[in-house]
Image (tube, rainbow, N blue to C red):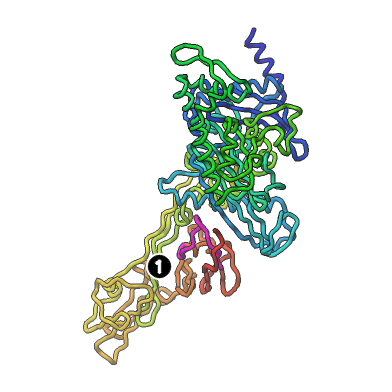
Amino acid sequence: MQKNAKKQAVNKLEEQGDRIFALDIGTRTVVGVVGEQAEDEFVLVEYAVEPHSKRAMSDGQIEDVKQVAKIVAKVKTRLEELTGIKLTKVSIAAAGRALKTGLTKMEFDISERESITADMVKSMEIEAVQKAQSELNLESSDKVSFYCVGYSVINYLLDDYKMLSLETHKGKNATIELIATFLPSVVVDGLYSVMSLNGLSVAGMTLEPIAAMNVVVPPEIRAINIALVDIGAGTSDIAVSRDGSVVAYSMATTAGDEITEEIIKAFFVDFAVAEEMKLNSTSGKKEFEYRDIFGLTQKVSTTEFNRKIDGATENLAGAVCEHIQSANKASPAAVFLVGGGSLISGLSKKVAAKLGLDENRVAIGNHRTLRGVDTRGKELGAEFITPIGIALTAILNRGYDFSTITLNDEKIRIFDTKKISVFELLTLAGYKTTDIMGRSGRGLNYTVNGKRKLVKGGNLTPAEITVSGQPASINTNVTQGDEVKFTPAVSGENASITLKEVVSQFDTIDDVSVYVNGEEKPGTYELNPFDKIEIISADADDSFYPVPQDSAGAAPVKLSAGEIAFEPDPNGIYTDTKPEEYGEITLSLNGTVLTLDPTPDRAPHKFLELLNFTEFDMVNPVASYTLLLNGRDASFNDPIKDGDTAVIEIVEKKAV
């Protein structure tokens, strides 16, 4: 009967719809909030807090997925009971353990646009974030994959003028400068696994200091140089604003746990009692009781308690201030302390002293410092700043998808997959252009007595791509939940031939001299591109010019020197024929003559293929390039043909 009653209760729950469920998974507690959007603010409906029953996290990182999932389940169930809503989507945040940041500046040509739309701005921002992520993955010496967990725009520029917003404007060039934050895949994957075990899909993800910044230091006050510090149990996460933007992030592994450990040693108590004593010390009581490890009940005054942990508090203040000054390059004008660790007695005064600030310039966040939030009269402490910030960030970031695509059984998480192609996905995953597209082996051009010849390079083996089981190309778009299978292309071998092999194409004759670029060479000499070979008969009256079979396919043309015949194309060697007849083309790239073999499907060649013959780095494109085809601006999709002249050159750096 009880089971049936529970099922009926679940069935009566409302759909979540647009209501927001946010979770702050801390080292000591899990805090959940449910609310809804009213214009541009978050209206709190309910909240729930559940402590971890045993250590399952360290420095903000999940170490026991199943144990953390159990606590999340309790918070989720409690909120469903309080709200009557079936919670299926959640917004989450990660602490800054192993945090990496990337400062990126990108320029975009918008001269052909009528005006800049919101979608265009999002697309440009996402492109900058993806480039920063590619650069970070390349820099990772141990091949650890990093995921972006949030970013902040530092500057918008329109034709070199600073703008508050790019939307609805027109111009020639738009520039976006932003700072993106990244965490190793193990940190992000742990959070996603916990959500999956609770039947929750991740609607949005951010970094804890970004979330707190959005709710305490919104854009309208970021002209002030403010440092926000989210002090949890395992980490102290820091964000810094200046000149209207968030300009830096940092993280210290010194946090509330260091205080707890000092309490354990000073008062001979276990971890749970130490945590309880820490809470009692901030309750306003003059003294409180505790039970030590010997089972004895003890009393301590709050004054004595704070004196005994003063050294640990001093160390915490020192670590926080050191990271603030490192990130900001100086002391800021003000500091906000949030998170449960910020409530430690005397901490704010020590931070002020170490930074040289007045004590009233270091504030502890609470419901009164929240901006863009309606708590409906609920008085909330510093530990609720981050979870409410996660919810508000979810409102601000709607339209910015953080989605998962499976590539060769590995999950790749990226921002905004609405317009991402297989090619972009592969570059983000670290594949090089040659892996994705491959290339035919380079052909070898040379001449024999003025007649042009070509040895074809080996054919490429094209990459194999499927998306959700269906054949696909590099231009196929992918989105949330797609499964991509990719087998890299295999490039063909470059053509090679020795001088002996060249001469062997002709009938043997006596008294013939062979020269390469005016010098005699041995038969083992391997030809280089554009070598000029001369075969000269000892009989000066005779001429020696090998020619191909006639067009009608008759017997080989006889030559005057000893009845020598040229056998056309015995080993893939062609002479004096139009390349179009065989599907290859010859063109100039940056002043060098190239020959391209036919494409696998005999489709027209594209400008994009020429990247295989340059230093153009598609995985880490940190420079701006000029692309010209026959003297005119070109794009990667432009067709190329025999006789064309192409240019690919670096013109300036465009990333810092």
Q: How many labels sit on residues? A: 1
Q: Quadrant of the C terminus?
A: bottom right
Element class at badge 1: loop
Residue 60 visible in the shown view: no
Residue 121 in percent (x, y) is at 67, 53
Q: Which residue is mark 1?
A: 443
Which image quadrant for residue 198? top right
Residue 285 location in percent, x, y? 62, 20
With respect to residue 580, does 254 lie above or below?
A: above
Magenta span contains residue 617: yes
Is residue 470 a member of the stretch shown in magenta? Answer: no
Q: Nearer the viewer, residue 100 or 461?
A: 100
Q: What kind of residue is marked 1? A: Gly
Question: Which residue is painted at 53% across and 24% down in the image?
Answer: 305
Residue that protrudes farthest toward the top in the picture: 1
* Residue at the spot 29% in from the left edge and 82% down from the top edge: 535
Name the one closer to the observer, 44 or 280: 280
- Image coordinates of residue 162 in percent, x first then y, are 69, 59
Please give the name of the residue rendered at 25% of the width and 89% of the height, measured from the top-left corner.
539
Label 1 environment density (alpha carbons within 10 Å; few <14, some 14–19, many ≥20): many
Provide the residue span drawn in magenta: 612-626
Q: Is residue 351 above or below residue 534?
A: above
In x, y percent, where is residue 333? 63, 47
The single residue placed furthest to the left in the displayed view is 510
Q: Is residue 216 left or right of residue 628?
A: right
State whether residue 366 appears in this view: yes
Residue at 52% over, 20% down: 53
Asked if residue 253 is positioned above or below residue 113 in the image, the reply reads above
Residue 171 picture quarter: bottom right
